[in-house]
Image (spheres, grey):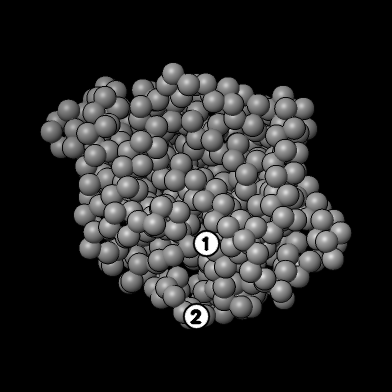
Amino acid sequence: MICLDGRTAYKPWPAGSVAAGFMDSGAPRRSLGALGFAFVMFSMAACLPLFFLGPIAYQFGLSLGEALLAALLGNLVVAVAMALNGYPGVRERIDFPEQARRVFGATGAKIVVALRGLVGALWFGVEAYNGALALIMILLLALGLGGDNLIARATLLLPLALVAYLAAMLAVLWRGVEGIGLAASIAGPLLLLYFAWLAWWLHTSGSTAAVEAPTGVGLLSLPFLVYLAIQTNWWATVAVNMSDLSRLARDWRSVWIGVLLGMVGGQLLGTYLSYQLILMTGKSLPHEIIASYAPGAIAILVGLLFAFLAPWTTDITANVPALIDVLKSVAGLNWRRASIAAVILGFILAPWWALDAAQQIVDYVTAFAASYGVILGPILGPMIAAVWIVKARDNPGHARIKADAMAAFLLGVAASYAASLAMGGVQLVQLGPVAVPFPSGPTWYIGVAFSLAAYIALAKARS
């Protein structure tokens, strides 16, 4: 489970993967040094949604320099949050649920784990959409039904492809996820290498720019701040449950080097490549770029195969087990029943029912990735404060709900949403017949800072 897609499971990891045994019960092996942990983080970053970051920046009117600056700043902040919040995993080798229990209480931990799982479940839907789309495109090309209408035909048949995508996933989950770990470790990086090769091929073949590069929006503009929020939120998911990963590191130095080289470096590379590709092709969806610009049938099929494998292995080793664990802990289901429920939820959560054009999946990811910082930031604030200031780890207690942490979380959510309203960042996104209000902007930063300060004040008042 290396291509985590930011939506990592806290257990179990598949046997055969680099992290085998790490997420199982008992103390994990400290098997990864700095370079090994950097590869874990790079493989996590190298996933299909990474190639939406360039088109999103382009649609907001950001220049390449502004897009890379937002990627650097947003991911550096997240890297620091990852390392700070991952310290208990390095020192005590505890996982996210245990760390959350110490901060929020037994019942409070279930709430925050479920909220973290909800974000992962929605990313599961995004990955399933993209993987199923690649799968049906491969089938259509094999049947000689390519051409200019390939994406339209594939979108029309997407529900059937999604059934096949999830059925294959269930078949593997029913027997366990052994053997998937290696594919999960390399599918994302291979996809990144493929697009690096495709961009190089387009450049050396004399292809001219399909669209004009934006001139920029300014660093204090709302579009830049929203894009900064998207870059931040992308892996702010992992910052919450970082102890799940940091337990694998030999020492804290390896965690710092890993997140800086692997995660920040991967995000910068993906942002650069995807920005250049939209300028060269004028297309936002990676599937469209492959089908329209890869040189020859073999290159197209190989690209689409990577576009299928990267989401599928991410889902089966990261997103689905995370959802299964929530179903097991909240609904009391066993592994097999939770697996069935998870793939059914995957079918529902994949936004095929709300989207009927390629550009719409990019718009959906834009709205989604800009918004969930309003939840994750207020969770992270008390967790970091509990490690470094309040020292909750020294007295974990057995309270069902620790009122100071839960109150700080709720205050952080309220502050984040209020800030989004004040900046004019709340937008209605049409999902089928329902208009959903999505808060956007740098709400994660506000949520972390406000909930951290509130938790310190409340904990001090309690003592």
In percent of width and height, residue 68 lies at: 64, 43
In percent of width and height, residue 366 lies at: 54, 33
Task: Say what amino acid the circle numbered 1 marks.
Answer: Met
Q: Which residue is mark 2?
A: 27
408 sits left or right of 71 in the view: right
Q: Which one is closest to the eye, mark 1 or mark 2? A: 2
Q: Looking at the picture, does residue 11 appear above or below residue 125?
A: below
- Front-most of 391 and 129? 391
Q: Looking at the picture, does residue 41 appear above or below residue 373?
A: below
369 sits left or right of 85 in the view: left
Q: What is the number of the mark on residue 41? A: 1
Q: Looking at the picture, does residue 51 appear above or below residue 251?
A: above
337 sits left or right of 385 in the view: left
* Numbered circles on residues, count: 2
Give the residue drawn at x 42%, y 39%: 126
155 sits left or right of 417 in the view: left
Give the residue drawn at x 27%, y 38%: 162
Residue 230, image quadrant = top right
In 3D space, how far apart are the residues under numbered discs 1 and 2 (Cα atoms)? 21 Å
- Front-most of 386 and 79? 386
Q: Looking at the picture, does residue 176 appear above or below residue 355?
A: below
In percent of width and height, residue 283 lies at: 43, 28
Mark 1 element type: helix
- Front-most of 32 and 398? 398
